Each structure stands twice: as structure tokens, then as C-alpha cells.
Image (tube, rainbow, N blue to C red):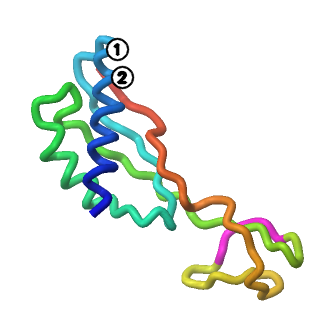
Amino acid sequence: MHELSVTENIIKICTEEAVKHKVTAVKCINLQIGELSGLIPKCIQYYFDIASKGTPIEGALLNVEKIPVEINCVCCGYEGRLIKDKYNCPQCGSYDVKIIRGREFLIKSMEVD
């Protein structure tokens, strides 16, 4: 259910930016969401459609770019993506890895009129 608070923050930040730059309409908000963030884009869109009513960003499309999980293996030095649903190094099999991407949540940009 943390999608609601995340969505409220998206609305707050984007509304402030729209007002600050005297934007008449926001067409699209581009988000980057890591696969390990735990956020569900459909839930964010659902809450956004409800909570943005009456704001300068009402009606904007949320465009979500998924950020895949990437690791750095402590044992062999591999740096790259994991195999889907496996959490060990695809090169040497070690579980001694550091996650370097995949937890992000960013408002990348807004497309406006």
C-alpha cells in the first residue's frame, strides 16, 4: 500500500514544478522504477488518476520504465544483470553479490504544453 504515499509525492513534486514553470498542461510524467522497488505501476496509475483530480497534472499519463536488477559479484567481479528469478552470480554462481541497480524510483521528466 506504499504506492499511495509514493503517488502523493509524485503529485506534489510534479504539481510544484508545473506551477513554478507556469505550465498549462502536463501530458506525461516519465518514471523509472526498479524491479526490486516493490512498487506496482498499475497501482500508482490507479491512485494517480484519483488523487490528481483538480491539480495541474490531472489527466497526465504515467510512463513507467522498468529498471532491471544489476549486480556486482564480490567473488569474480562480474557486473551486470541477473538471470530472472535467480539471485546468484550468473558467471560463477556465488551468492556474495552487491545489488547496484534495481531499487530506484525516480521522476525522470515531464512532457508539458
Q: Position of residue 72 (x, y in %)?
A: 77, 67
Rendered position, 96 above or below 11: below
Q: Position of residue 37 (x, y in %)?
A: 47, 62
> In which quadrant of the rendered view does residue 31 lie?
top left
Mark drawn on residue 93:
none
Three-letter amino acid code of the residue under disc 2? Glu
In the rendered structure, the answer to whether residue 54 lies left or right of residue 108 reads: left
Q: Position of residue 10 (x, y in %)?
A: 33, 40
In the rendered structure, the answer to whether residue 46 lies left or right of residue 97 reads: left
* In contact (CB < 8 Å): disc 2 and disc 1: yes
Task: Classify 10 Å Cα crowding around label 2: few (below 14), some (14-19), many (20 and above).
Answer: some
Q: Is residue 113 magenta?
A: no
Q: Which residue lies at the image location 82% right of the left edge and 71% below the top edge?
A: 78
Question: Is the N terminus in the top left, top right, bottom left or bottom right quadrant?
Answer: bottom left
Rendered position, 71 above or below 2: below
Task: Write the start and end of the magenta stretch as one range.
Answer: 78-82
Distance from the alpha carbon under mark 2 to that under mark 1: 5 Å
Three-letter amino acid code of the residue under disc 1? Lys
> In which quadrant of the rendered view does residue 14 lie?
top left
Q: Nearer the viewer, residue 39 or 110?
A: 39
Rendered position, 32 above or below 73: above
Q: Which residue lies at the image location 17% right of the left edge and 29% below the top edge?
A: 55
Total tally of numbered discs in the picture: 2
Secondary structure under tag 1 reads helix
Q: In the rendered image, which residue does mark 1 sit on?
A: 20
Secondary structure under tag 2 reads helix
Q: Position of residue 22 (x, y in %)?
A: 29, 11
Question: Is the C terminus in the top left, top right, bottom left or bottom right quadrant?
Answer: top left
Q: In the rendered image, which residue does mark 2 sit on?
A: 17
